[in-house]
């Protein structure tokens, strides 16, 4: 399990890990400190990591990054702002991640997506 750096002002902490699922095999889970858990297939985790990395690097000029993961009750809905992203849960809770945290999250999602299976 990897933990994001929650010590920075205005950046919420997060964890990314892999859990076993009887139908999907290994699911990548994203927990942001004030929001419900999000579960991603390995493919979704890889795609989301790439989208976040491209946006953080300026290679993609998105205003919003959205994904409705198949194995999760929570969508990934993030508004792109000048200082980073604002991730909003389905019930309206907001979490800010600065660009450094976004790059960290993108790398962790990609790393866990390709980690050995735990099924």
Image: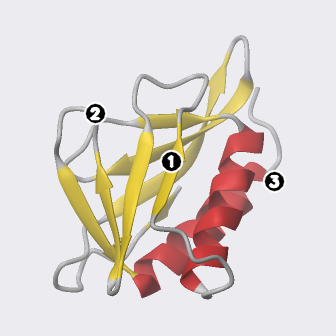
Query: Mark 3 or mark 1: which comes first in sequence?
Result: 1
Q: Residue at position x 16%, y 85% from top?
A: 9
Q: Residue at position x 55%, y 48% from top?
A: 17
Colour setup of the view: secondary structure
28 on left or right of 44:
left
78 on left or right of 112:
left
Residue ID for mark 2: 90
User: How far apart are labels 2 and 1 at the CA level?
Assistant: 12 Å
| Nearest the eye: 104 or 87 | 87
Q: Which of marks 2 and 3 is in front?
A: 2
Residue 94 placement (x, y as % from top left): 20, 54
Residue ID for mark 1: 66
Q: Residues within 10 Å of mark 3 (few under 14, many from 20)?
A: few
Name the quadrant containing residue 84: bottom left
Marks 3,1: beta carbons within 8 A: no
Q: In this view, does 106 lie above or below 69?
A: below
Where residue 114 is drawn, which disc sits there?
Answer: 3
| SS category of the residue bearing label 1 | strand
């Amino acid at each position: 399990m990897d933990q994001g750096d929650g010590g920075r002002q205005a950046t919420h902490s997060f964890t990314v890990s892999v859990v076993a699922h009887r139908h999907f095999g290994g699911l990548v889970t994203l927990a942001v400190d004030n929001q419900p858990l999000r579960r991603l297939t390995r493919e979704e985790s890889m795609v989301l990591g790439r989208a976040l990395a491209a946006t953080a690097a300026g290679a993609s000029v998105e205003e919003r990054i959205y994904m409705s993961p198949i194995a999760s009750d929570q969508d990934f809905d993030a508004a792109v702002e000048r200082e980073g992203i604002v991730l909003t849960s389905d019930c309206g809770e907001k979490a800010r991640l600065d660009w450094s945290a976004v790059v960290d999250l993108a790398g962790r999602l990609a790393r866990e997506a390709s980690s050995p299976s735990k099924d």
